């Protein structure tokens, strides 16, 4: 939430820290962790929001690269998605970035970044759903509906890779799918219904790996 009054010193520190990080030529892991600390402890203040034109594209560039800085960069995007009314202008960029990350979910070493890319959508949906009745969240809801046809198949794919007794992207994907349905159940059903039919209602293949698809369909 935006800070004011007694929090002005913290806000000023957060803004200065973000500016310092953005002016740096580095996209290092350390710089991304510093930015995450600023967002978590300093809050997403008006000064930070004013710099979203620089912050969001930089985070998306870092998140798209295969190095250690991806993890804190995606965590920053998840933090920023809480202010859906300000992040909506960047939704197509965020959609492309996070879905590209999800498509790498078959690489076990990237399970953390996959989970964070899913978490961004969960935080966004939670923010929309918890918005005050008088708040106009229709633009953000439209952005979510627009993303669902491409996003939900990736979530279902993540759900189908669950490992018994282990937590990871599959659990996050299931929770995110429920939140997406809470935002726009009709749009989600259009995508999910064929998956359920293919894996439960029809004569689904009975291979060693197919139980995961059936489990995801049940979920």
Image: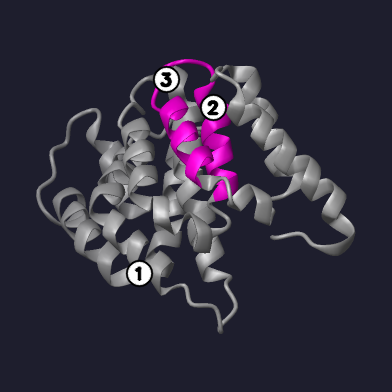
- Viewer-side label of 1, 3: 1
Residue at left offset 54%, top offset 31%: 73
Residue 67, position in %: x, y? 47, 15
Q: Reading the chain from its start, which is encountered first: label 1 or label 3?
A: 3
Residue 138, position in %: x, y? 40, 74
Circle on res. 197: none
Q: In the structure shown, which secondary structural element does the residue marked by tag 2 occupy?
A: helix
Compared across the picture, whether 161 is left or right of 122 comes to left
| Residue with the mark numbered 1 | 184
Start-end of magenta stretch = 53-80
Tell me the quarter of the image containing the N terminus.
Answer: bottom right
Q: State the separation of the CA atoms marked 2 and 3.
A: 14 Å
Q: State the separation of the CA atoms marked 1 and 3.
A: 31 Å
| Residue with the mark numbered 3 | 108
Residue at left offset 35%, top offset 61%: 143
Q: What colouring method underlies this structural image?
A: one colour
Circle on res. 71: 2
| Residue closest to the eye, 48 or 160 | 48
| Residue closest to the eye, 103 or 160 | 103
Does the segment drawn in magenta span residue 59?
yes
Q: In the structure shown, which secondary structural element does the residue marked by tag 3 occupy?
A: helix
Q: State the separation of the CA atoms marked 1 and 2.
A: 29 Å
Residue 52, position in %: x, y? 53, 46
- Viewer-side label of 2, 3: 2
């Amino acid at each position: 939430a935006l800070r004011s009054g007694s929090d002005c010193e913290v806000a000023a520190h957060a803004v200065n820290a973000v500016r310092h990080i953005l002016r740096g030529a580095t996209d290092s892991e350390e710089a991304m962790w510093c930015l995450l600390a600023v967002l978590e402890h300093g809050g997403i203040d008006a000064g930070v929001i004013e710099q979203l034109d620089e912050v969001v594209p930089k985070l998306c560039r870092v998140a798209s690269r295969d190095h250690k800085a991806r993890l804190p960069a995606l965590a920053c995007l998840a933090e920023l998605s809480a202010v859906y009314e300000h992040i909506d202008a960047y939704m197509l960029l965020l959609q492309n970035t996070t879905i590209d990350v999800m498509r790498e979910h078959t690489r076990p070493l990237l399970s953390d970044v996959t989970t964070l890319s899913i978490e961004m959508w969960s935080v966004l949906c939670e923010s929309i759903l918890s918005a005050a009745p008088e708040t106009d969240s229709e633009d953000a809801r439209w952005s979510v509906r627009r993303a669902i046809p491409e996003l939900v198949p990736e979530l279902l794919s993540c759900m189908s890779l669950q490992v018994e007794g282990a937590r990871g992207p599959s659990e996050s994907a299931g929770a995110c799918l429920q939140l997406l349905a809470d935002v726009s159940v009709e749009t989600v059903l259009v995508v999910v219904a064929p998956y359920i039919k293919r894996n439960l209602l029809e004569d689904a293949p009975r291979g060693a790996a197919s139980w995961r698809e059936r489990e995801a369909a049940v979920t």
